[in-house]
Image (cartoon, rainbow, N blue to C red):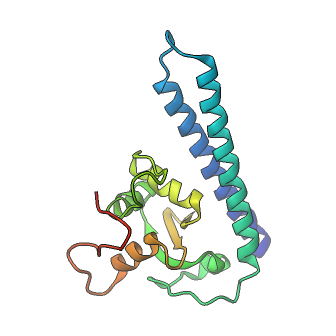
């Protein structure tokens, strides 16, 4: 894949995940709103908050994409060998391997999660993986029928995914300071 096509695919992936997250949030708001007793002001505020959070995620991903391009020579500690077809995304962080789906990724990451109250809602496993992508802790990319994962070095997800790839993993993932296992 040439650089231009890779850049467009990178942008498209972020845009798609931002749109999916916003749609999921709006559906959740609609489910939780009781039509008979709904206060329009409260509903408008929830929708405005959802839009603001979506715009923030969009800007954060865009800024990260721009800043990471300037660090193309950085060295990474990959948990798995980076496939040649994904070399154009080398700047995204530590390559952690491929998963069959965002759900499979989320199931693994659910075991080692952030502290309560950090805004990571208790949605489905795919929602958790998507939220971590939107936060910039992970970057996911669909290629050849799999979800390929890059992690921000030193993040909780990086530690969890490095544990998965270790040659002799312990029966349970390590307890990472500052995190809890639900």
123 to 2, vertically: above or below = above
| Image coords of residue 62 (percent x, y) | 73, 61
| Image coords of residue 103 (percent x, y) | 41, 54
Task: Name the residue nearer the viewer: 4 or 26.
Answer: 26
Task: Name the residue nearer the viewer: 45 or 22.
Answer: 45
- Determine the residue located farthest toward the left in the rendered image: 171
Q: In which quarter of the image is the N terminus?
A: bottom right
Residue 23 found in image quarter:
top right
Residue 110 found in image quarter:
bottom left
Picture residue at 55% right of the left edge, 38% below the top: 25
Task: Name the residue nearer the viewer: 114 or 24.
Answer: 114
Question: Is residue 151 toward the left or the right of residue 91 in the image?
Answer: left
Question: Is residue 69 toward the left or the right of residue 112 in the image?
Answer: right
| Image coords of residue 91 (percent x, y) | 65, 79
Picture residue at 62% right of the left edge, 18% below the top: 40
- Determine the residue located farthest toward the right in the rendered image: 4
| Image coords of residue 168 (percent x, y) | 26, 86
Picture residue at 30% right of the left edge, 73% below the top: 175
Picture residue at 67% right of the left edge, 78% below the top: 88
Q: How many numbered dots are placed on residues in this image? A: 0
Q: Quadrant of the C terminus?
A: bottom left
């Amino acid at each position: 894949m040439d650089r231009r096509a890779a850049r467009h695919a990178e942008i498209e992936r972020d845009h798609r995940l931002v749109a999916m997250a916003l749609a999921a949030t709006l559906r959740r708001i609609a489910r939780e709103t009781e039509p008979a007793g709904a206060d329009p002001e409260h509903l408008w505020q929830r929708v405005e908050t959802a839009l603001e959070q979506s715009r923030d995620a969009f800007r954060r991903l865009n800024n990260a994409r721009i800043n990471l391009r300037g660090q193309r020579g950085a060295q990474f500690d990959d948990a798995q060998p980076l496939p040649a077809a994904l070399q154009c995304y080398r700047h995204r962080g530590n390559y952690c391997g491929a998963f069959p789906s965002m759900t499979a990724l989320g199931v693994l990451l659910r075991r080692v999660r952030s502290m309560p109250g950090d805004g990571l809602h208790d949605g489905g496993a795919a929602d958790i993986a998507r939220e971590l992508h939107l936060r910039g802790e992970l970057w996911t990319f669909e290629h050849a029928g799999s979800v390929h994962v890059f992690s921000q070095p030193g993040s909780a997800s990086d530690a969890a995914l490095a544990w998965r790839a270790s040659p002799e993993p312990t029966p349970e993932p390590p307890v990472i300071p500052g995190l809890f296992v639900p």
